[in-house]
Image: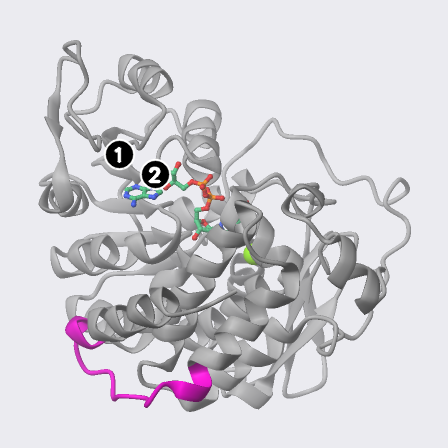
Amino acid sequence: MALDIARGIAVLGATGSIGRQTLDAVRQCLPHGRVRVLTGYRKTAEMAALVAEFSPEKVWMPEPPADNWGCEVVTGEEGLLSCARHEGVDVVVNALVGRAGLAPTLAAIQAGKHVALANKESLVTAGALIMAEARARGVNVTPIDSEHSAIWQCLQGNEGNAVEKIILTASGGPFRTWERSRIAREATAEEALRHPNWHMGPKITIDSATLMNKGLEYMEALWLFGVRPEQVEILVHPQSIIHSMVQFADGSVMAQMGLPDMRLPILYALTGPKRVETPFPRLDLLKHNTLTFEAPEEEKFPCLALAKRAAMLGGTAPAVMNAVNEWAVGQFLRGKITFYDISAIISQALDSYTVQPLTKAGDVWAAEAWANNFVGRVSI
Ligand code: NAD
Ligand code: MG
């Protein structure tokens, strides 16, 4: 079913990296898109400017703004969920970061909204629930993540053709060429924030440096495309030009290429499988004339193996892994722990956690409560 962006779009996380790029894509390429709901966070002045430009009906902020924005302003947890359910909105762009994204994803789907999903943590922690609810309500969950967008694009016109494997590409992050001992000594948050190809929010930037991002994307792919774990291969491709590939039963491989610009997968999530015209720079393969591929080094980047382990454990294990990772990334960003502390703490958490079945959202909240308690006892 096509998403009706003229009826209404909600952008959750409007002032973040994906939120801003979503609004820029709407501004430049979707003149018929109607932004009815925006949620902000801390950047009040930037949010006020977006409200003035897009005239939404409803806005969420952690605190009510001092001046009048000429629209309904809501706050609190319930307010955020009401944004995801807002009457008249057909598609919710979930560009929130981390575990805060799951409840709004579920609320939107349960209210019959399509979800253009950047918040991969939703699928990681509760993929089974999200996919089952979406099927039951007949709504689409379209990927904004560039790799999953690429896979979705490669699958177009191939309905009924068996997928042999999905080849998920990874940039390898800023420490790809460093020795393990140098990473242990010198991999600071500041170094990690200098990502070679993409400019993203701080959490995903650190996840890219540890390769946890690829682990989260591995789980995201399992849910979105219904493939088995052994059908997903991760390949390091430092130039980030091929965004991912699909190999079919005849051995043929389809790849999707483009400059690393998140506005392209964002637009495809809103209009796909239709494409819209864009004024963005074009890929010049004479300039980008070297495309290389390497195997990921799991001993240097243990988070990748930890994500696979959590996926294999299933149930609530990914929710624990995700919550502990989010906490550890926060600590790393504040300079409190080292690069390899992140994986060591997640590994300890998975060792001491007894996995529970996942049948309702409450199971995720319980797993996250366990993780909160666990990190409260971590001594570094
Ligand atoms: P970001 O940090 O730039 O923005 C996230 C936004 O979420 C914040 O600006 C804020 O508006 C909101 N937010 C954060 N915590 C909140 C809370 N507790 N309650 C309400 N709102 C809150 O992050 P980002 O890079 O835009 O990433 C967003 C999501 O998209 C992540 O799940 C990330 O993995 C995914 N993603 C991002 C990129 C990218 O290029 N940035 C690419 C692929 C996927
Ligand atoms: Mg990605």
Quadrant position of residue 93: top left
285 within the magenta span: no
In the rendered structure, does residue 359 fall within the stretch colored magenta?
yes
- Assess whether mark 2 and mark 1 are in contact (beta carbons under 8 angstroms): yes
Q: Which portion, as a residue range, is magenta?
A: 350-363
Mark 2, ligand 1, within 8 Å: the answer is yes
Q: Is residue 154 visible?
A: no
Residue 105 versus residue 257: which sits nearer the camera?
A: 105
Q: Label 2 amino acid?
A: Gly
Please state the horizontal and vertical placement of residue 238, each as a whole percent of the image: 78, 56
Query: Looking at the picture, how far across and down is residue 168, in whole percent?
Result: 63, 69
Mark 1 and mark 2: Cα distance apart in space: 5 Å
- Which quadrant of the render holds ligand 1? top left
Identify the secondary structure beneath mark 1.
strand
* Residue lying at the far top of the rendered structure: 67
Earlier sequence position, callout 1 versus callout 2: 2
Mark 2 residue element: loop
In the image, is 32 to the left or to the right of 378? left
Residue 317, percent from left and from top: 37, 81
Q: Is mark 1 within 8 Å of ligand 1?
A: yes
- Residue at 72% over, 85% down: 251
Query: Which residue is at a point 69% across and 31% down the rendered structure image?
Result: 281
**Residue 261, horizontal then vertical, whole percent:** 61, 40
Q: How is the image coloured?
A: one colour
- Residue beneath disc 1: 39
Left or right: 92 with respect to 289?
Answer: left
Amino acid type indicated by mark 1? Thr
Residue 202 horizontal side relative to residue 233, left or right: left
The number of discs equals 2
| Residue beneath the point at 52% across and 67% down | 217
Which residue is denoted by mark 2 in the rendering?
Answer: 13
Q: Residues within 10 Å of mark 1 (few under 14, many from 20)?
A: many
